[in-house]
Image: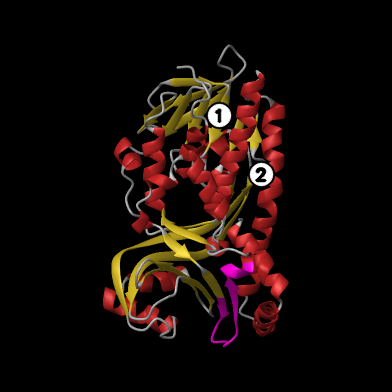
Amino acid sequence: MKFDVVVVGAGPAGLCFARSLRDSGLSVAVVEKQPLEAIADPAFDGREIALTHASRRILEGLGLWQAFDPDDISDLRDARISDGDSAHALQISARDGRSEKLGWLVPNHVIRRAAWQAVSTQDNVELVAGCGVQAVAEGGDGGDGVTVSLEDGRHLSARLLVAADSRFSQLRRMLGVGARSRDHGVRMMVCRFRHTRPHGHVAWEWFDYGHTLALLPLNGNLSSAVLTLSPAEMERTQGMDDAALAADLQRRMRGRLGEVTMTGSRHVYPLVSVYADSFVARRAALIGDAAVGMHPVTAHGFNLGLQGQERLADAVLAAHRSGADIGADAVLARYHRQHHAAALPIYAATRTVLRLYNDEHRVARVLRRATLRVANRVAPFRRAIAAHLTQA
């Protein structure tokens, strides 16, 4: 089967890229190993996605934001960063970013469902579900393209191949693209809980000793906890019943939100960061986590992936409108330059934050507390962080 573009991975990045090519006249195949039911009606996975103003603009342009139930959209007005039991916290206000809000929180499965609903109505997209990729080879489309061999024996040819199949991308390996990967040696639990005191739509990040805890404010007196622990500690925590886990979270938050009650399911993920050596290969491009898999501490992984697919789509559509080859090296090089320039500073800054705030040595503790105190008093610094968070 011949297509202009083959996208491997029907997650948010892959589906949003396919959506970006609507009305272009380009034929698109989206290949996903999961069955159709899992794509059309994704299960709740615990993850709440912090969306910037730039991401909202992109989602509105794709027609996704309008499909969200308003009850699933939670305002993110302010943020606070604390170190251990220190009374000093870095407070980032939406006003620092000259905006009413820092951003919004939307559940990951809600975004995925809206993305599929939008793409499923496109005449130029064909979904190949329940089947993985077995091999990739140059050639196809008249000899000047790429051929994707599927596990069921089918072959797809295209002028451009797009890898959007997670930070553990098999397609990236098939393309011969290396990646700098770091296993942080910890596990992350995400779960929702109710509390008796209002959160004021303020996000908290506690860098404590032996663990990190983030609080993401949802509508009502409901929040999502993101707890990072060593594997051994996480195994013990997973074994707690709801009452014990609620008491544990309440203790870790030092009672700031009053009495805590668990609600819903728990989900645990390994924390691995990935940065591909290149975002392109011969007639191929990497987007989403296949290109850059961020640590969630800066909450920019999804936003970066969303912007990356937009950059690639812009380059492809510009080439298509001019009659140029959409898979040409020059087209892909443009995407690589733009996305690398945007992604590397965020990735490097995240690594720096992690090194400082995960260091248990006394000197590091003193340094990070001093950093928060000074930063909180310097308005231009707070405004710079707010501008980075909002991307307004």
Q: Is residue 311 left or right of residue 219?
A: right
Residue in front for this viewpoint, 67 or 146? 67
Give the labeled residue for mark 2. Answer: 339
In the displayed orientation, state which residue is furthest to the top. Answer: 142
Q: Is residue 358 visible?
A: no
Which residue is pictured at 65% across the width and 73% down the height? 356
Tell me which amino acid carries mark 1: Leu
Above-or-below relation of 323 to 380:
above
Which label sits on residue 366?
Answer: none
Question: Under tag 1, what secondary structure?
Answer: strand
Q: Position of residue 174 (x, y in %)?
A: 56, 34
| Quadrant (top left/top right/bottom left/bottom right) for the N terminus | top left
Residue in front for this viewpoint, 227 or 221? 221
* CA neighbours of label 1 inside 10 A, class few (<14), some (14 to 19), many (20+): many
* CA neighbours of label 2 inside 10 A, class few (<14), some (14 to 19), many (20+): many
Question: Under tag 2, what secondary structure?
Answer: helix
Q: Which residues are magenta?
A: 81-96
| Quadrant (top left/top right/bottom left/bottom right) for the C terminus | bottom right
Tell me which amino acid carries mark 2: His
Residue in front for this viewpoint, 227 or 55? 55
Tally of marks: 2
Q: Calculate the distance from the C-alpha at mark 1 to the C-alpha at mark 2.
A: 17 Å
Above-or-below relation of 5 to 1:
below
Give the labeled residue for mark 1. Answer: 161
